[in-house]
Each structure stands twice: as C-alpha cells, then as structure tokens.
Amino acid sequence: METFNTTSSYGQPKQPIIPPTTGTSHLNVGGTERVASLLGGVLLTYFGLRKPNAGGLMMAAAGGAMLFRGATGYCPLNSALGRDSSTGTGAALEITRSLTIHKPRHEVYQFWRQLENLPKFMHHLQEVRQFGPKRSHWVATVPKGLGTVAWDADIVEEEENTRLVWRSLPDSDIDNAGEVRFSDAPDGGTIVQATISYRPPVGQLGGSVAKLLNPKLEQMVAEDLHRFKALMETGEAIREESQPLG
C-alpha cells in the first residue's frame, strides 16, 4: 500500500512540519544592500586577483564574500548581530508518503531510530553520524554532480515505536525538518508515514537548488520508502540505476 497523504496514519489532520529559517534559507540583506554588495564584490575580486601577494588574496576573498552576500541575500555577520534588513524566506516544500511493511512495529522503528542505518536505503544520503541520543550530522549528495550539502539536526520529539520528529540546526546548508510515524496495519505489519520538508537557500543559488530538487523530492521519498520496505522484509534494499536524489 502506498498513499500521498494530508492526514496522519491515526486519522487526525496532519500538522505541517515547518523547517527552521535560521540557515541560508533566511534572507537578511535588503535589495539596495545586495546590489551594493555585488558591485563591491566584483571590484574587490577583480583588483585583488591582479595583485599576486597576500594582500591581493585577502582582497579577493573579501570580494567573494560580498558576492555571496549579494547573490544569496544572506549575511552570516547580520545573522550573528541579529540584524535583518529583509523579511524574506525561502518557501518550504513538504512531501508525505506512506506504505505498509510486513514486520513488527518495534522492529521497524528500532531500525529507523538508529539513524546511521538511513543511508542503507536513502541513496541521496552519503552518511549520517550520531552524536549522542538526539543530535546527528547529515551529508547528502546534490544532483548533477554539484557536490554535497551538510547539516546537523536534533530529534525534537520522540514517542518510542510510534513517532520521530527532527529539525536541522542553525546555519545548515539547507534548512529542513521531518517526521516519521509508525502504526499497526489492520492486516498486520507496520504503516510507515514519512513527511519531509525543506527550505532551499534564497537567491540565485537557492533558485538553482530548488529547480533541481523540487521535481525529484516526491519521487525520492517514495523510492526511499520502497527500499526501506525491501530491506526490512528481505534483508536487501532494491538496487536501482538512478541518479542521486532521483
């Protein structure tokens, strides 16, 4: 069984999983400042690269930082100082999928709860490392060979054998959140319902990432769950010839 849900597996309206806006999805540089940053960044980078010395390299590095500030609309210094000249944020995208796995609920839950197991069936994940009972570090592959993105996350709600909710920490490459619910299926086995939500970075970088990820996210979540089902029921995940995040 596979469904695309707007209600929880308990028959109640599903509450949206809202990712934070504390990382690069937060727009904290206004339009005028962004234009000035772009112009200043171009000049600093140009003149810095023309000077083959340490001072030139420092100037070019400062120019690169200003270009990033102007292109994305995000400034780490503004974030540290609590300064915000814009209220814009990247729109959140949420996908929910579910299916039935013919294994006991406690067994299915315990496998997922060991977060380092997730790359075994989530092919877009390069690694997940746990740092204690709640915190973990995630590295994911970006499509089209564009490298990786990384973030730290905390489990913010947990009901053993029933529910897990996590959110990324500040300054993540991509702000994201998620929830997985585990419930008994009427004919035996376990219904697993996964909800994934993320905010891509703002600006030109964010637009490019969103165009790559948005069409793929629903398919990715469905394929992850199918691999999870196969892994739990047969001991081996489905092998597919597909691109990362595809």
Image (tube, rainbow, N blue to C red):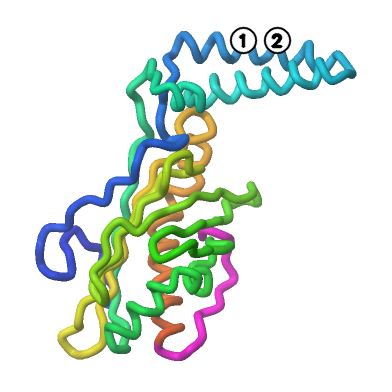
Residue 207, magenta (yes or no): no
Q: Position of residue 196 (x, y in %)?
A: 35, 56
Rendered position, 74 above or below 244 = above
Task: Residue at 33% x, 22% y: name it.
Answer: 87
Identity, as a three-letter code, of the amino acid under mark 1: Leu
Residue range highlighted in magenta? 233-246
Task: Residue at 45% x, 76% y: name it.
Answer: 227
Mark 2 and mark 1 residues within 8 Å of each other at the beta carbon = yes
Query: What residue is shown with label 2?
Result: 43
Give 12 or 4, whichever is nearer the viewer: 12
Q: Position of residue 190 (x, y in %)?
A: 26, 82
Query: What residue is shown with label 1?
Result: 39
Q: Position of residue 116 (x, y in %)?
A: 50, 70
Rendered position, 155 above or below 197 = below
The secondary structure making up most of the magenta span is loop
User: In which quarter of the view is residue 27 placed?
Assistant: top left
Q: Is residue 128 left or right of residue 226?
A: right
Identity, as a three-letter code, of the amino acid under mark 2: Leu
Rendered position, 12 above or below 44 = below
Q: Is residue 146 left or right of residue 133?
A: right
